[in-house]
Amino acid sequence: MTSRLGVMLLAAAVSSSMTLTVAPLPAQRKEPPPTTIRFFGRVESVDVERKSLTVKHGEIAGYAGAGKTEHTVDDLATLKRLLPGDDIRATVHPNDPVLHQVQVVYRRAPSTPNRPGK
């Protein structure tokens, strides 16, 4: 009987030391939506294979100084429609090179070659 009591006490001690303590999950933080910045510029070049374009732009407060920058776009179909010389507007986020919601604001008329005799 004593050995049975000893086994039960030992089992109780082992099971109490093996109790799993589950830490509460940290409260899920709701990330604020990313800051959106309006981007305006002129398309310098489009590279469909690399899925990128180069845009010349003025200073964009909170995003980039004036210059030429390379970007990708959030929609490949939009990239395929863009032409060098297009003035565009888009939405960007700090530290993110992707142009979102790209729209052509102005497209220059294609130049026509001089025709002889006219």
Image (cartoon, grey):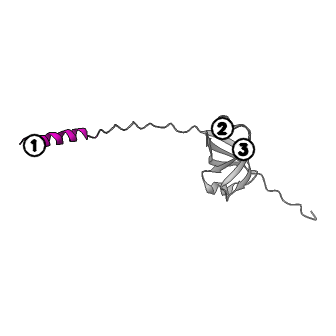
Could you classify mark 2 by the number of other residues whose Cα lies within 10 Å: few (under 14), some (14-19), or many (20 or more)? Answer: some
The numbered mark at residue 63 is 2
Most common secondary structure along the magenta stretch:
helix
Give the CA separation, mark 1 to mark 3.
86 Å
Residue 19, magenta (yes or no): yes
Q: Of marks 1 and 3, which one's residue comes earlier in the chain?
A: 1
Residue 114 is situated, as x and y percent measured from the top left of the image, at 89, 60
Please tell me whether mark 1 or mark 3 is closer to you in this view. Answer: 1
List x then y, in percent, for residue 14.
21, 41
Q: Mark 3 sits on what residue?
A: 41
Question: Which-is-in-front pick, marks 3 and 2?
Answer: 2
Which residue corresponds to the image point at 49% horizontal and 37% vertical from the top-left?
A: 31
The residues bearing labels 3 and 2 have C-alpha atoms spaced at a distance of: 13 Å
Q: Which residue is mark 1?
A: 3
Task: Measuring from the top left, give residue 57's x and y in whole percent.
Answer: 73, 42
Give the magenta part as a residue range: 1-20
Identify the secondary structure beneath mark 3: strand
